[in-house]
Image (cartoon, rainbow, N blue to C red):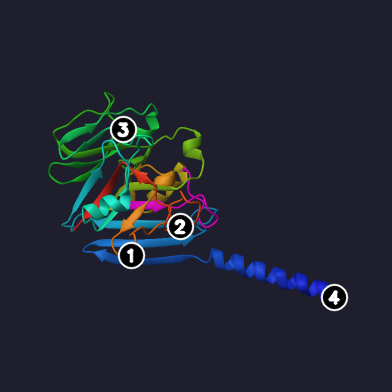
Amino acid sequence: MKQCRVFILILLFFAVSCSTRELVPEYRTGNIGEHIRWQVIRSSQITDAPLAVNILDIDLSAFEGGIDIAWRRDTLVKTSVMAREREALAAVNGSFFDMRVGGAVVYLQVDGRKVAENHDRHTFSNSGAYALDTSGTVTILKKPDSGWRYSPAFKDVMASGPLMIYRDTHCDLDPIPFNLRRHPRTAVGITGNDHLLLLTVDGRTKHSAGMTIPELRDYMDSLGCTDALNLDGGGSTTMYIRGKTPTGVVNCPSDNGRFDHDGERRVANAVIVLE
């Protein structure tokens, strides 16, 4: 009986030790280019569950490269492939698309021309937009009452949603499953000191639970965002940084059900960072 108790205590010791190691916070940061910082955060202290977060922080006041949109009209391609085709330094997946035949299902304007109308019946998925105006200023837009239309004032407009923060004010969020369940997420934000944040949150594994939209909104707020927009997430969530892994994928996309870099989904568009 005494030996049995000792054995149980040993098992408990190892169980606690393993749990402790899994929950030890990890924070890494480093520059990947001129005025671009990459942060990797693994912690259980952001929410009440384990999280793996990657953030690209671009100082727009000093960055001399370009932010562009790579896209496909009627096919699907991995974010990493689109990034490599354009010799991009970094990229994240873009907005919502038709998973059967490809192409955007929300409004998309690239290089000053409209390439996709809004076909998504869900209003939350196009309540905002990432945009680049003709002067080169990156901004986040709120959907006009008249809906998304071509505007010559903008080079790029990529509708998405939900819009989480607009002009330093939290946006109302519908109490729907898409918003209230934890999933992998991709988001774009602009801070008060003119930094562009491209962020991925891994999910659907024991190593990273994902976020609800309210949790993501609060986290973007804590990072200093005065405007923040949710992009396509779930299995689409991908961050690419050239040369950091064999494929360049630095987060852990969820489509293969494993916490590794190999579960990347094919998508229709991406936000890419050019040197």
Relative horizontal placement of residue 106, taking residue 41 as reference (left or right): left
Residue tagged 3: 106
> Tag 3 or tag 4, which sits nearer the N-term?
4
Q: Position of residue 57 (x, y in %)?
A: 30, 57
Looking at the image, which is closer to me, 66 or 226? 66
Q: Position of residue 268 (x, y in %)?
A: 31, 41
Residue tagged 4: 2
> Tag 4 or tag 1, which sits nearer the N-term?
4
Instruction: Rate crowding at label 3 as few (under 14), some (14 to 19) or many (20 or more) other CA atoms within 10 Å.
Output: many
Residue located farthest toward the top when viewing the structure as drawn: 146
Q: Amino acid at mark 3?
A: Val
The chief SS type of the magenta part is loop
* Image quadrant occupied by the N terminus: bottom right
Residue tagged 1: 244
Label 3 and label 2: CA atoms lie apart by 28 Å
Residue tagged 2: 52
